[in-house]
Amino acid sequence: MFNLLRTIIIFSICFLIGCVSNPPNPLTSEQIENICQKKKIEAAKPTTNLSLATGSEGPKYQIGITMSSDYLAGRDPNDVYNQCKMSYNS
């Protein structure tokens, strides 16, 4: 029991040291632009995904349609983009 407790404490300390020593890097303006452009496109129309694969059981097809909450709410894509930019520049 003592060994288990000691192991848990050691792993907890290592985990906390790892979290403290690796601060997140700030996003570049290009990354922010890409994120906000993607949100603008998602607010304008649904996006579709088509996946084709082959395996031992033969070909597999998968089609997906994704609709953002902004699209479903009918928000203006330009407003979504502007609010996104403002949220990252704050």
Image: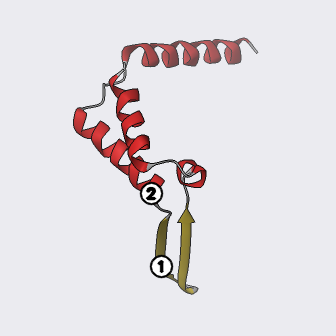
Distance between the alpha carbons at the discs numbered 2 and 1: 29 Å
Image vertical order of residue 2 relative to residue 25, above or below: above
Q: Amino acid at mark 2?
A: Ala
Residue at 55% x, 75% y is 62
Question: The residue under label 1 is which amino acid type?
Answer: Ala
* 38, 6: nearer the viewer: 38
Residue that numbered label 1 is attached to = 53
Query: Residue 90's x, y, as percent?
Result: 36, 20
Displayed quadrant of residue 25: top left
Q: Position of residue 70 (x, y in %)?
A: 54, 48
Residue, x 32% and y 25% (percent of image)? 89
Q: Nearer the viewer, residue 90 or 75?
A: 75
The residue closer to the viewer here, 69 or 22, is 69
> Which element is circle 2 on?
helix
Which mark lies nearer to you, 2 or 1? Answer: 2
Residue 33 located left or right of residue 14: left
Mark 2 packing: few (<14 Cα in 10 Å), some, or many (20+)?
many
The mark nearer the N terminus, 2 or 1, is 2
Residue 48 lies, in percent from the top left, at: 48, 68
- Residue ID at (30%, 45%): 34
Q: Tell me, for residue 7, which label it has, or none.
A: none
The numbered dot on residue 44 is: 2
Against 25, residue 46 (above or below) is below
